[in-house]
Amino acid sequence: MAASIAQFCVKFLPKRLQLMHQQTSCVCAFFSSSSSLNQPKQLKHVINYQRTRAEVARALRKKQNFLHHEMVDKHRASPLQSGTEQVSEEKGEGAPREYRYVMPEFLPNPDFQYRDKVLEKMERRDMLRRRAVIDIPEFYVGSIMAVTVSDPYSSGKTNRFVGICIDRGGRGLKAYFVLRNVVDGLGVEVMYEMYNPTVHSIQVLRLEKRLDDQLYYLRNAPLEHSTFSFDMQPVTLPRDVPVPVNTTKVKLNPKPWEYRWERFNLKGIEPLPLTPKMEKGIKEHAKPWEDYDLMLKYRQTVNEDEERSIMAEVYQENTRIDAGRKSSRAVLRRKK
Amino acid sequence: MASKSVMTLGVRPLSHSFIGSTPSAIYLGTNSVCVQQVRHRRFPKFVVRPTARRPWHVRKWTEKRDETLDASNEQFVKEVIIDKYANTASSPLKDGPWERHSYLRETRRSGVLALKLGTLLHWKKDGTPFTVTVLQVLDNHVINYVPPEVYATYPSHNPHQGLRFGLQVVGSLSCDPRQFSKPYNNLFLKAGVPPKRWLTRFLVTPDAAIQPGTALDVNHFKVGDYVDTQGRTRDYGFQGVIKRWGMKGMPKSHGTTKSERKMGATGGGGDKDGIWKGKHMPGMMGNYLRTMYGLKICRINTRYNLLYLAGVGVPGLPHTFIRVSDTVLPRKQRTEEQMSQVSMPTSFPEDLVEPLPEEIFTDDVFQFTEPSLQLEAEDS
């Protein structure tokens, strides 16, 4: 019965996803197939049809004052138009598939309302110009980094901070990362904008990944996990080695915590002692359907072709910059 | 009791009509509107939504298509259209170029129709970040100029302005003429340009009149100028009173019965039997004309015709069309030196002695090709 309902649901997916469904031939697990005799009472998720209908109505309502981005691109490419040059697409050697994880800030906004080819091209140009001036290395959440910024009030006019990267985000020129360290027994976190001109250098001392995307739970972990010496020497990795994954499991302090870490499905912490209330809260706030929500993933990612051409352009430009830049880098990494 | 008309409430400096597709909020003439008496509020957010089409608008779109065309004929027709508009400047039958005057303090130049692309982050040379809004001036041409004596006979003319201003019609985004109606296509005969998707008007002084058919691009402005941007705000649709007017609503618990997001009291009291006109209530939010005044042009890209304006608040979502014109703010007017540099009435290709660089910045904006900034301590 679940299978037939799932087949019925597939009809309402957009065409591209329908074809994808046929190819994979999996049964969409929107409905649980277990019997209700032995399981506890299932928590119902009621789909908010009202909001979806309103969104559809808004999308269909006649627009007076703006154009769809495809129409804008058509006008830019039109033979009747002269005086404005067209943004050229890069057609050359493509980037390796993992490049979008090396430089995630180059990926554009997945929301189609905010997409514009010319704006993205200009922003990428400015970002690559900045990258030609200072070296912004490859790093991941969990890498230990040292950042030097301009500080007019310190002797030597610069300020150097070393820490573990606990978060990385932002898009385009607003890209940021957060470093955490313990100074004089006090945890300190600093957010740095990657393309800020007052940042003089970004150096990766130890390149590694962790099991989670964000490490904010270090705030509720013993301070030894966040302590890194300011005199730490850079660690060089051998060539063509995949980025090492640090699988340490951090044991969190006893409660109180800053967030309800038991609900975050964290992999980098030791199993937490759960009370019945915590377990109930986990079940209530869990969203297991998000693993199967194709539309959510579709809306959160950029079209693969566009992503490929953007990354190809970035990759070419970066290899050109790297070739021109002198050696003596802390971490030597070359990707084929 | 005292009552004021809509006319005095709706005053905006140089607020002109949009010749758009459907109802737009315009500066109404005395003989084409019903004057509504409203009470002044502390926050005059009175939203005017006229519903009647302007009487001088021509029908724009047409549904008729030529079904008899096959693929090769279709291709031929497209080539004919492109050829027709390719060589517009070199006809000997056209009248010669108009006289050019110099820029005075009383001069009002034409503006430009731009496309809002989005926002970016930039930094100044002292390290402070600021947001820039990027606009693209795409495919603009001047369509028509109406001298002040003729404009004074138009129903949209405001008698308060007298014979100071002429009307400059500017259009943007060339299109295939087959999708438009005949009267709409005839608007573009004088200019000899392809019919445009968007049209707008600017009030200009006669010394800044531009000949129909002239192309406008980003060099109409210079880096360091201040401009006003006018456009339609984002459309939120029918919204409740909390989002639309910022009311507080009521607590979500502690016994509130079905009234968490309601308006509550409707006011009036002893003064009025009922509700005052203009009471803030749920309704259509957004999609009206708004102007952002005095934004500085901090950067220009001549290759892609981009304007980088320092600031946010340019109305609308990305790909909204925006009217950009010289600012009316008194403290942001040009200095004597800047007045001699102004392209009057606009910038022509023959004016440029040497080709302009692709990117032009103001002095205080950090260029990403420069080395990293070293901040200096402020002297106390």
Image: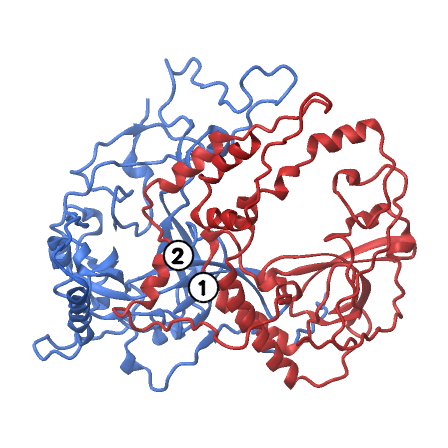
Disc 1 packing (10 Å; few <14; some 14–19; many ≥20)? some
Residue, far left? B93
- Pinpoint residue A305: horizontal percent, then vertical percent: 49, 63
Tell me where residue B138 appears, x and y as whole percent: 33, 65
The blue one among the chains is: B
- Nearer to the camera, A107 or B262: A107
B108 on left or right of B58: right
Q: Which chain is red?
A: A
Q: Which mark is residue A117?
A: 1
Above or below for B171 versus A260? below
Which residue is drawn at the image coordinates 32% and 25% (left, top)? B2
Q: Earlier in the sequence, mark 1 or mark 2?
A: 2
Q: Amino acid at mark 2?
A: His
For residue A147, which quarter of the picture? Answer: bottom right
Q: Quadrant of the C terminus of chain B?
A: bottom right
Q: Secondary structure at mark 1?
A: helix
Q: Which residue is mark 2?
A: A69
* Chain of the residue under the numbered disc 2 shown in the image: A
Q: Is residue A37 visible?
A: yes
